[in-house]
Image (cartoon, helix red, strand yellow):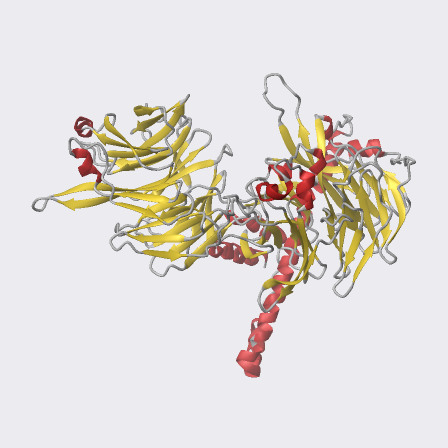
Amino acid sequence: MSPTEKAVKRQRPADASQDAKAGRSKRLKTDVILHKGDAAVALSEKKKKKQASEWSLDLVFRGNIFNIDPVFSVDEKYLFLSRGDAVQVYSLATQRPVKTLTMKDSSHVTGLQLVPSDPQHLYISTHSSRLIQWDWDAGRETTSPGNFVKVSLLEVVPLKVPDEEKQRMAYFAVKTKGARCHIAVNTDWTQRKDAPETVVFDTANVITHLKVVQGGQFIVACARQQLIIGTLSPKSKETGTFDDYEWREYRLPVKHITCLDVRESQIAVIGENTTMTIDIAIGDASGVILVYNNVLSSISREGTSGLPLLQRLHWHREAVASLRWSRDGNYIISGGKESVLVFWQLDSGRRNFLPHLSSPIRSITLSSVGALYAVQFADRSITVISATELNSVATIDGLQLPSSLEALVDINDRSVERSLGAGLPAILHPRQPEQLLLASPSGDSSSLTFLQTFNIQTGLQVARQALARTNVTVLNKGPEGTPILPPNVEFMELSGNGQCLATIDSWSPHQKDVEPSLGPLLDNAQLQKRKEVFLKFWHWSEAQGIWELATRVETPHLALSGEAVQILSLKARSDRSEFVTLGSDLTIKVWQPTARYTTSPNLSYAGHDITTGAMSFSEDGSILAVGLKNAVHLIDTRQWSVYCSRQVFSADSIRSVEFQGRYLIILSEQSLAVWNVVDDVIQTPATPASSSSGSFKNIALAVDSSTDTFAVVTKTLGANLPSQPSRKTTHSITVYSTSTMTPLSESGLENAPIKFLADPNNGGYIAIDVAANLWRFSHPNRNIQALAESSEESGRQLSAVGAGLDNIFGRAGQKTLEQTRSIQQPTTPTLKLENLGGIFDRAPPFALPPATALFKDVVNALVSSS
């Protein structure tokens, strides 16, 4: 059946305009006229209406661990790490965050420093030109100057100044000014906010690494192939000004310096006198490590033109990402893209390996004692390893999103543009709604090859496993040096019982690999012919605790010419273990555990290439809605035949369709429509306030049957002003009432969202942005109801535990307990939900106080309500 060419007359409720004005929440722009006589009554009704309709957007947790070297506390009990615009204090004993410092101006953290002689203070540099001295034990900022501009590298060093008993905290910073870099020193910034800086070195090269050792007496820096060493002059050392250094530059036999580490050591001279020296280790882009020992003695000798090379180590195939000296100086620890931690024994020349790590290594951090290593990986996770046992002490995970998210947020090429709902495969578990399942990459790659299961209530990773072929721990380059890219998971769906998982992944060869057979000039259509597509079905194994591959279907949709057809959509049926795929060949295939059925309804569009499509099952599974171009087709799932087709929009392509009872919500880039499939009536909801402020674009849709609402994510482009180089882009979430077709609430997002889901268990909606932050947009009443359900579940668990005590104490113990109850006759306390709401809703999960403090607050709430 072909879609009807006759335009459908859209019907709007008679009072739609009035509802659009009077039914919106406080967040929307409305005009209310109050008469003097009824002003108090109208204000009271307005306040009640606001409380009944106001929704809140709350940050649940920050899921991204940024590429900033973590820092150990001096006692090795805590680890400080960056969460974007916040610094998190992570307890290694409980493996939970205990404190969080959020930047007041929402700027990102660029560096963390902890001085062993000042263990209670953490020094934080931010993008907004601030250097913060944070008393992390007390949880307050002590110093925060505002002239910390254009800083790329930072070192905070305690200085011993003559005639002063207390050490000064000075910072050495690399700053850029035009096309030049310079090293600046400030020794009085903790005493005076307007303390002046002193530039001690200036160069035209870009300084990439900086180390300050021996209390500011020596500065070691790197710039591409140059090693720069500065020695404090004796006069400046005596006066304590630290403004005069003698500099030496050495050109090293390397391709490009990628990492640097400096170690201080003591060397005995004549008698009992000792002197200090430094050892330097440098990592190269070609995988070479250069080791220089006793550098100061070489500098002090006259007539020397270079540094004496002690050792040249080479094992890494690619660039050395990070290296560190051991505290005793006997070995060097290095890591890179090979996902292997290498231990170099300098005396014997032997190597030890810790292989098969989860992802390429980004950085290595040692604790002050050297008993723990913190290894940060490219998949945005941190593993703390014991130096003696070489086993994992703690693992800190975030939401592992792909490194290049622009393709999922905004694509200029409209022919390959995909909806936000299909951009990042992610779903909530139907039986365990606190678990979020999303496809994640293995490292810096944009290909999604792993399945990450994340608990959105605790902010912790539950499991992680591969969904496609991976090359994390093997050679990932071909004979010609071209990278071997892994497959990319494009779609993922779960059955209603949560036992069956369906995924679709695709893989295309590198262009250089097919040039000998197809020629040097290849377009996307020719590469598409070599594309491989696999449909995989996974079954959950309770014994193993993983998803086991049950069936793999190669090329589920096959064109007549023999190449794989692009999959446009994958949907799971809620009432049974059944999945449906929609291909660009306009064929719908139904997949069941025991049989496979194929239907080819006539959905062809002459002269048009279908690159986008959307599907949705009704709640009872009897109807499948398919959106192609500007029409919607309703398919009877009993006969698998098209029984109705409607042209919804005049020319706009459909991005998403979702069922909610008898209503089918249809979303396109510029329009929104609600189709009552029972009465065969199409209505257009009222336009929110954000749509009139500039050019807008709808990018995502989600429906929540528990609240009888649906929500739309909109991207709005501001006005094109001559003073601004680019138009400002904002993103907002608008919640509509399905029954009244009016917007209930609207809220803006700080970052662009990449996934938008409905949470029917708790009510409301969940949004994941490009910074891996998870937001919840919900109604306060639903939060209280969810808390009540959680309290009831806890009560049932306590009752089950009490019943299990009978097996331990026996009938005599039960009789004794009954006699005690009859004597005491306690009054059953009534739990007040508002008391618990004040305990658990006062902060996001990652910023809540320790469990002991929460337990005391809950006990106090129970005592006060009894």
Give the vertical position of 627 relative to 804 (above or below). above
Which residue in the rendered view is the most extreme toward the top?
A: 722
- Is residue 274 rendered to the left or right of residue 249? left
x and y, in percent, of residue 174 in the image:
36, 29
Give the vertical position of 247 relative to 291 (above or below). above
Q: Give 551 or 705, whichever is nearer the viewer.
A: 551
Residue 563 visible in this rendered orientation of the protein: yes
Residue 55 visible in this rendered orientation of the protein: no
Q: Residue at x 38, y 27 (%)?
A: 175
Q: Which corner quadrant of the image does residue 181 belong to?
A: top left
x and y, in percent, of residue 671 in the image:
78, 34
Which residue in the rendered view is the most extreme toward the left?
A: 271
Q: Give 173 or 660, whichever is nearer the viewer.
A: 173
- Is residue 241 rendered to the left or right of residue 573? left
Q: Total label count?
A: 0
Q: Give 374 or 797, whichever is nearer the viewer.
A: 374
Q: Give 223 or 315, whichever is nearer the viewer.
A: 315
x and y, in percent, of residue 137 in the image:
39, 45
x and y, in percent, of residue 29 in the image:
72, 29
Q: Which corner quadrant of the image does residue 286 belong to?
A: top left
Q: Residue at x 22, y 30 (%)?
A: 232
- Is residue 576 rendered to the left or right of residue 792? right
Q: Residue at x 36, y 31 (%)?
A: 207
Give the vertical position of 48 relative to 75 (above or below). above
**The C terminus - image quarter:** bottom right
